[in-house]
Amino acid sequence: MDKDARAARGSWTRRRFVSAVAGAAAVVAVPSPAAPPADGTAPADSAAADERAVTRPPRKAAGPRALYLGTYTSVEGGGTGIGLASYDPATGRITGSGTLTGVRDPSYLALHPDGRTLYAVDEGQDGAVTAVRLADRRILGSRSTGGAGPCHLSVHPGGRWLLSANYGSGSVTVHPIDASGALGERTELVTHSTPPPGPGQDGPHAHQFITSPDGGHVLAVDLGTDTVYTYRLDQAKGTLTEVAQAHTRPGAGPRHLTFHPGGRYAYLANEVDDTVAVCAYDPATGRLTVGAPQPTGSAGGTNYPAQILVTANGSYAFLANRGHNSIARYAVEADGARLRLLGTVPVAGDFPRQIAFAPDGRLLFAANQRSGTVSVFHVDPASGELRLAGEPFASPVAVCALPL
């Protein structure tokens, strides 16, 4: 997105274009989190206690798999809706098959746990979220998020609640999901009012809203306040109660959090100061403890870390570097408590906004915003090596790739 287009879209688009500084030490450990309850049980309102079981469709036979692509529809050179494509799970080759129109600025996409419904943000001044039934690609309707510039959404593991983050207004929203996958009117809207904005920020800027692995808490990452907020979600009412705050160093600008499969540690990508951090997580209280900043492999150049992922076996992590235009590779050590930077791999595109694994973890997709391409890499689960799978696929202003 060029400077003029960003200005036309409004102030919330600053989230992708802030200045950055160099990172710090390559290996940092954090304190161990508190032990879970002695009986091993999760909190009473955890996803495990959800009365409505999510039924997943059977796995398809080997062959092409669906791929959905997010874009901006309101900028020059952008797309016209959600891109439709398929990919070969063996070779990684992508084949386009058209566009699902009728969804504005679908810059982030998420799938319901049962695999039947796709959700998209409408990253506009009057933010909204949209549900799409995948069987016939019918749009089931949109609901207002009550905020500006929603940039992230996720589905609670129980399948009954959609969580979204409004970057422009610094708020998070909850919507109910009915049996058809359609969305109801929002049940909660919380604006991050404390602490005050960090250095260089004009207000709160919620960038991500996800559920912890234990299902007992939901966490909102706010770039503007340098804070990760932990809430308890009332799964009967869809309301939020704040239970903890975790603060980065001032000016870090946290953007994206991902958990280690063990559920006791998480990794935080900081957009503004070009670092990552290991965080300890206490499932009993929902409290996150942010560790020291670590480098992204950008060697001190202009770089904006975007998204970080961890392999299913918990052995490796990958970070998308916008500016350095690479994917940083980390070895995950000490049962998740430590990251060791292994190096970087060129992304074969410009400004990798988002990365995602294929369901089996053997492919990694990188949506490159400025080059309008999607790069695909083979992932070696034993060594964490990445190998480019052919030429990148052209997709207008590619900002999200969701492989099914």
Image (tube, rainbow, N blue to C red):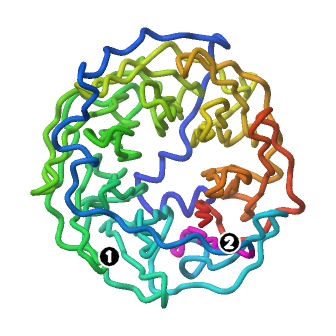
| Residue beneath the point at 42% across and 17% down | 249
- Residue 17: x, y in percent? 56, 44
Is 85 magenta? The answer is: no
Is 66 magenta? The answer is: yes
Query: In what quadrant of the picture does the C terminus appear?
Result: bottom right
Query: Which callout, 1 or 2, points to the residue nearer the camera?
Result: 1
Give amino acid for label 2.
Pro
Q: According to the image, label 1 marks what residue?
A: 181
| Residue beneath the point at 81% across and 63% down | 90
- Residue 67: x, y in percent? 64, 71
Between 328 and 114, the residue placed more toward the observer is 114
Q: Is residue 159 left or right of residue 234?
A: right
Q: Quadrant of residue 298?
A: top right
Considering every residue shown, the one lying at the far right of the view is 390
- Secondary structure of the residue carrying numbered label 1: loop
Q: CA distance from mark 1 to mark 2?
A: 28 Å
Between 45 and 139, the residue placed more toward the observer is 45
Pointer 2: residues within 10 angstroms few (<14), some, or many (20+)?
many
Q: Is residue 32 left or right of residue 84?
A: left
- Residue 324: x, y in percent? 75, 37
Q: Which residues are magenta?
A: 63-74
| Residue beneath the point at 16% across and 53% down | 235
Query: In what quadrant of the picture does the N terminus appear?
Result: bottom right
Q: Is residue 7 above or below residue 16?
A: below
Checking the image for residue 305, the label placed there is none
- Residue 277: x, y in percent? 52, 22
Q: According to the image, label 2 marks what residue?
A: 396
Q: Is residue 58 left or right of residue 129?
A: right
Pointer 1: residues within 10 angstroms few (<14), some, or many (20+)?
many
Give amino acid for label 1.
Gly
| Residue beneath the point at 32% across and 66% down | 127
Between 58 and 150, the residue placed more toward the observer is 58
